[in-house]
Amino acid sequence: MKKVLISMVVGIFVMGQASLVFADGYEGPGIGRRHVSMGGTGIGLADDWTAIYWNPAGLTQLEGSGIGADLAYPIVDQYDSNSIFNGNFADMSKDRNDVFFRVYNIPGVAVEPAQFSKTKVTSKVLLPSFGGYHKMGDWTLAGGMYVQVGSTTDWEDTVQDTVNGAEIKGSYLSELGIIVNNFSIARKILPNLSLGAGLNLLYGKTKLEVDKSYTSAALPALNYATSAASDADGFACEWMAGILYKVHPKLSIGGVYRSGADIELNGSAKVNHSIVPAVNGNSNYTQSFPYASTWGIGLAFRPIKKLLFTSDWTRTDWTKMRREFDYDSPGGALQDENYDLDWVVSDRYHFGGEYNLCDNWAVRGGFYLDPSPVPDKGASLTLIADTDSKAYTCGIGYNNKNLSIDLCYVFAEGKREADGIVYKKRVNDIGVTFTYGW
């Protein structure tokens, strides 16, 4: 019996550690509320300081110097009709990242329910960005910082043993953030052709806390508690390149490529179990997190002075997503792991427009399709209950001499069903951007 319990605990805590960087993952539609409000389009336009993200070649369109700040506040609701698994160990799924299992399934004595009851989890996170640029002769230099990937999942629930009424509490906290520090340079090499390049220093940080307790007033001898925790961070570099071609005074075409990188996260992990102390322990570890590469093309067309249409296509290569953990002192519940998650390439399609009401005010709107790269077998609240989503964007902008202010709202939702389980995702995102140039 002791060996069975040890194998169960080892399996669950290894998966709990591996889940962290994918739990409730959220990648935003871009930076700069003007571009986001036009359906997340900016590759073919890229005419402000946020070109450090969209397309560095667009920096050549700027004059003088300028600074800007952007703040987005996405609220992401994810729903899993099956809640979080708490069934038999033999039925656990590593692909789905089940982080709990029931220890007791003894008819007439103690029977834990096969799953928890809370089916929805909400992630709220602030994504700040800022940057600046300066034109020096034929060259434009720029730089900034943005948080394009960020997530916080804080789930907890309480259910009861169906026989003796014991209280079973489970909690799952995960945090992920990737901060991008950018330096870009651009130059117009022909009257209608500009090239740009950028270097991104990536800082990644992850945190995980998993806890479960079983408390029976009638049978206190059955009581137990389990926990796992980890914390890690690390750096990596990626490069990016962009091109912008003015086909006509009313039409421009742009292209961008971001190389992606493997971020090496270094941290520590700890496991405790009150029934099987043999699995308790501490270890430093290294985790390789693949930051996906992205490329895309975009168009910007202005048929008349007051009206602008934009569209982008972007492709993100998620195929390198994997679980890869190396422990300094492997053993017990902390075991090395390295395998592919079978994520796929995703293609996003963005469309938007802007209409200038007068010299100072503009209204904007847009739409984009965001397919999920996560296979059906990998969907869950403890991994990512992701869906193919449709997003609708709108915004308004004010520009007065050197100062501009842009407001934006994004609504996105999606739904899918796999193996009889329904997954839903909904995003409400508000944001504001301030830009000052001289």
Image (cartoon, grey):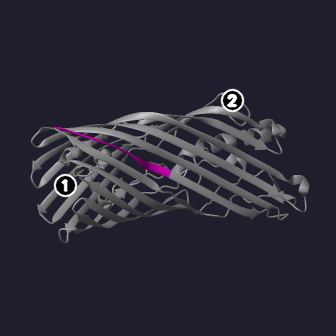
Task: Please give the name of the residue rendered at 21% of the width and 47% of the height, measured from the top-left corner.
Answer: 64
| Residue 141 belongs to the span the image colors magenta | yes
Q: Is residue 141 left or right of residue 24?
A: left
- Residue 50 in the image: x percent, y percent? 31, 50
Q: Residue at x 87, y 53 (%)?
A: 222
Residue 272, percent from left and from top:
76, 42
Give the side of residue 199 with respect to residue 425, left or right.
Answer: left
Q: Residue furthest top?
A: 328
**Foreground pick, 425 / 183:** 183
Tag 2's secondary structure? loop
Q: Is residue 138 above or below residue 75?
A: above
- Residue range in magenta is 138-150
Q: Quadrant of residue 245?
A: top left
In the image, is 112 to the left or to the right of 188?
right
Choose mark 1 or mark 2, whichever is in front: 1
Instruction: Inspect this view and state whether residue 147 appears.
Output: yes
Q: Nearer the viewer, residue 397 or 22?
A: 397
Q: Amino acid at mark 1?
A: Ala
Q: The residue tagged with tag 1: helix, strand or loop?
A: strand
Q: Does 111 appear above or below 264?
A: below
Number of labels in the image equals 2
Tell me: residue 128, above or below residue 188. Answer: below
Residue appearing at x 11%, y 55% in the figure: 250
- Amino acid under label 2? Pro
Q: Are marks 1 and 2 in contact (CB under 8 Å)?
A: no
Q: Earlier in the sequence, mark 1 or mark 2?
A: 1
Q: Is residue 380 visible?
A: no
Q: Which residue is mark 1?
A: 300
Quarter in which the N terminus is drawn = top right
Q: Is residue 435 above or below residue 242?
A: below
**Horizontal placement of 334 versus 276: left or right?**
left
Which residue lies under the disc numbered 2?
330
